[in-house]
Image (cartoon, grey):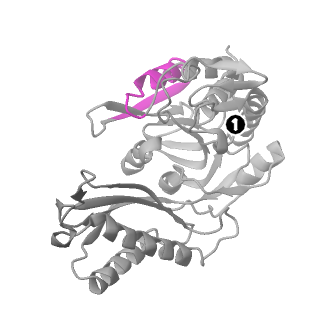
């Protein structure tokens, strides 16, 4: 029986960035599921590059069909890491912290789940328990959306693993991604009047995006920090050479809508501003292309699970400003809570870590929840 720390060392050592198959992580977990206790279903698909990805839904055999009392959900992929970071897939423990890619987001939670399952007498459970592994969360919750379309499982309670510092999270912002393509006319830079600079026009777009961001900020939800839908122009790419009037410029835009707000509202505001610019500046040509639009995670109708987790950890319920799989899995459960060890502020970067004390506390908490809800 391995401890949560030993399991996490194993998991971090398995490279699982979203560009590669998550099969090795699924295989590691599946090898730890006792066949007399679990019935395992696999939901594979191929990503845009043709790489095989696998979602796993395991249910204890004391249930019927695809229904569970409690589902524990965890994604299996990580963000890319700096090749120069030696600890990324060679994890190390220092000063009570385990360092490595995915240690916090979110293999730490998965290690805690596996450790807690090994300490519970699963054959004695009176109500069915489920373990769900998803692929490609980091690039758009693709695996979770796949499972939702398949209606792969239905549970009364669901805990979705994310680093929340062991706060039970009942709500989260959505996520939308789009690109604005600004088109001009290329000419030699010695004769600018014969062309049209796409970069100059992109600057006009940026001014309007800042105006939209201020408008979005007027509608607030005090449960979040910041308490409004944020908008960001994160990338600008344009031009071909220093002595050419640029014929095209692309602006990557993202926004994170608060619950109760249509994620399409920001897109509508952007299109309205682009139309105004078209009327105000003859020859102006810019279009918005939405690539992703995920809804916010609104609180469930009940808070029984959140209250139970809060009583076990001593942490109050919270809301988070980052996107999670909860928005896509909420239709498959009566109550969804996002929960896990670690803090998102240390995730997605070199030096990512999770404290071993938080892992230990999470294992004890998950074990108590399983006993309480399924025992």
User: Residue 141's x, y, as percent?
Assistant: 44, 46
Picture quarter with the C terminus: top right
Q: Above or below — where is 96 with respect to 249?
A: above
Q: Is residue 129 above or below residue 261?
A: above
| Image quadrant occupied by the N terminus | top right
Q: Can residue 231 be found in the magenta stretch?
A: no
As rendered, which of 242 and 366 lies closer to the eye? Answer: 242
**Residue 224 percent across, percent down from the top left:** 67, 63
User: Vertical placement of 361 versus 160: above or below?
Assistant: above
Residue drawn where x is 47% and y is 54% of the image: 328
From where the camera sits, is residue 317 visible? yes
Name the residue nearer the viewer: 372 or 261. Answer: 261
User: Which residue shows up at 76% across the image and 37% down it?
Assistant: 365
Element type where label 1 sits in the image: helix
- The quarter holding residue 130 reads top right
Q: Could you classify mark 1 by the number of other residues whose Cα lies within 10 Å: few (under 14), some (14-19), or many (20 or more)?
A: many
Q: Quadrant of residue 301?
A: bottom right
* Residue lying at the far bottom of the rendered structure: 279
Q: Residue furthest top?
A: 1
Magenta residues span 18-44
The picture places residue 359, in percent across and down from the top left corner, at: 73, 30
Q: Residue at x 75, y 26 (%)?
A: 356
Displayed quadrant of residue 193: bottom left
The image shows a total of numbered marks equal to 1
Which is nearer the eye, 195 or 222? 195
Residue found farthest to the front? 190
- Relative placement, left or right, of 366 versus 194 is right
Q: Which residue is label 1 attached to? A: 370
């Amino acid at each position: 029986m391995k401890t949560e720390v030993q399991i996490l060392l194993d998991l971090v050592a398995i490279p699982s960035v979203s560009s590669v198959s998550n099969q090795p992580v699924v295989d590691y977990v599946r090898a730890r599921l006792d066949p007399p206790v679990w019935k395992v279903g696999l939901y594979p698909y191929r990503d845009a590059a043709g790489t095989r990805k696998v979602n796993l839904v395991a249910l204890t055999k004391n249930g019927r069909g695809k229904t569970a009392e409690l589902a524990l959900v965890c994604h299996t992929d990580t963000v890319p890491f700096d090749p120069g970071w030696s600890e990324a897939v060679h994890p190390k423990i220092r000063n009570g912290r385990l360092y490595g890619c995915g240690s916090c987001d979110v293999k730490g939670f998965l290690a805690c789940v596996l450790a807690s399952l090994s300490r519970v007498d699963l054959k004695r459970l009176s109500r069915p328990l489920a373990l769900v592994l998803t692929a490609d969360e980091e690039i758009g919750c693709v695996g979770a959306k796949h499972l939702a379309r398949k209606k792969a499982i239905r549970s009364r309670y669901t805990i979705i693993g994310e680093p929340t510092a062991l706060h039970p999270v009942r709500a989260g912002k959505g996520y939308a991604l789009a690109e604005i393509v600004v088109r001009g006319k290329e000419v030699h830079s010695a004769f600018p009047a014969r062309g049209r600079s796409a970069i100059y026009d992109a600057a006009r777009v940026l001014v309007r995006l800042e105006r939209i961001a201020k408008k979005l900020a007027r509608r607030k939800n005090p449960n979040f920090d910041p308490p409004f839908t944020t908008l960001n122009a994160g990338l600008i790419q344009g031009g071909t050479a220093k002595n050419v009037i640029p014929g095209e410029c692309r602006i990557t835009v993202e926004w994170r809508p608060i619950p109760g707000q249509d994620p399409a509202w920001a897109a509508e505001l952007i299109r309205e501003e682009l139309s105004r610019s078209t009327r105000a500046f003859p020859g102006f040509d810019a279009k918005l292309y939405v690539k992703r639009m995920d809804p916010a995670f609104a609180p469930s109708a009940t808070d029984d699970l959140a209250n139970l987790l809060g009583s076990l950890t001593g942490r109050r319920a919270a809301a988070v400003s980052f996107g999670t799989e909860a928005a896509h899995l909420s239709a498959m459960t009566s109550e969804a809570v996002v929960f896990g060890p670690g803090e998102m502020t240390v995730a997605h970067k070199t030096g990512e870590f999770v404290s071993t004390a938080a892992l230990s506390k999470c294992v004890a908490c998950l074990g108590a929840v399983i006993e309480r809800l399924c025992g």
